[in-house]
């Protein structure tokens, strides 16, 4: 995989000292064209950027060096952390998104993402549960990369996690928010809990986006928690 470094974003700054790079955040561009997305990511006035941009034909642009703090996460939260930009690498996938004609991610694009993500994971100590979408870290604001993204296929290739299909029949607990918080979401208030459940479903149960803590959604959440909490 060739990485094009000919176009660079000015929108970055030093990472804080002693802050690990322990998250990988995936986005879609959510703009009408790849050209518009690239222009925005490289516009100083926009004050947004990502480390990488992957075109639908698989071309990869490196916009910001990994040792720099890119501006891709915005107001966000994951596993007790709020300054996600300081500890993450951000990858933008060219896709019009829900506003401009959301579509599946082409094989060439996913192939490049798989290879790039694998290289990033080799360079940085990123736990599998910290491979997240923008919707996971900002569920009340964002939907990307969305329900058409192939999270399950990435997990099959060793990138991220996917729940076991064997857990079933779990009854709704009194505090669904507590389970969502254990996984990583900000989910204390009712609106936060509802948004977090939809984000969870986008990631791990894309056929159902109703935000309801039914048996199947809870089974998948419990499966994931068992994977990470019982691994040590």
Image (cartoon, rainbow, N blue to C red):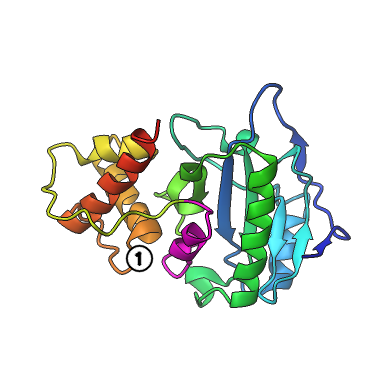
Name the image quarter holding residue 143.
Answer: bottom left
Q: Report the front residue among 36 and 66.
A: 66
| Stretch in magenta | 144-160
Report helix, strand or loop for mark 1.
loop
On whether residue 156 falls in the magenta region, the answer is: yes
Residue at the farthest right position: 6
Q: Residues within 10 Å of mark 1 (few under 14, many from 20)?
A: some
Q: Report the front residue among 197 and 182.
A: 182
The residue to which callout 1 is attached is 206
Q: Quadrant of the N terminus?
A: bottom right
- Side (left or right) of 231 relative to 81: left
- Side (left or right) of 161 relative to 56: left
Q: Report the front residue among 93 and 29.
A: 93
Chief secondary structure of the magenta portion:
loop
Q: Residue at x 77, y 48 (%)?
A: 64
In the depicted structure, whether residue 174 falls above or below residue 207: above
On the image, the x and y values in percent for residue 165 come to: 27, 59
On the image, the x and y values in percent for residue 16 come to: 70, 25
Q: Residue at x 71, y 50 (%)?
A: 51
On whether residue 14 falls in the magenta region, the answer is: no
Q: Residue at x 76, y 45 (%)?
A: 11
């Amino acid at each position: 995989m060739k990485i094009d470094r000919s176009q660079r974003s000015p929108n970055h700054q030093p990472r804080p000292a002693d802050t690990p790079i322990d998250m990988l955040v995936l986005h879609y561009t959510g703009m009408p064209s790849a050209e518009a997305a690239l222009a925005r990511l490289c516009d100083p006035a926009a004050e947004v950027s990502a480390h990488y941009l992957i075109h639908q034909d698989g071309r990869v642009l490196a916009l910001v060096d990994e040792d720099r703090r890119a501006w891709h996460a915005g107001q966000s939260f994951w596993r007790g952390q709020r300054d996600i930009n300081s500890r993450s690498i951000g990858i933008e996938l060219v896709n019009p998104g829900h506003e401009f004609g959301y579509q599946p991610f082409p094989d060439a694009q996913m192939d490049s993402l798989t290879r790039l993500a694998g290289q990033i994971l080799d360079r940085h100590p990123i736990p599998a549960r910290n491979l997240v979408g923008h919707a996971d870290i900002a569920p009340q604001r964002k939907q990307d990369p969305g329900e058409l993204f192939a999270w399950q296929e990435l997990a099959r290739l060793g990138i991220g996690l996917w729940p076991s299909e064997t857990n079933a029949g779990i009854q709704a607990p009194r505090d669904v928010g507590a389970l969502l918080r254990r996984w990583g979401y900000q989910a204390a208030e009712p609106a936060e809990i509802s948004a977090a459940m939809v984000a969870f479903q986008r990631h791990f149960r894309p056929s159902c986006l109703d935000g309801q803590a039914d048996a199947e959604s809870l089974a998948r959440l419990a499966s994931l928690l068992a994977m990470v909490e019982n691994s040590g």
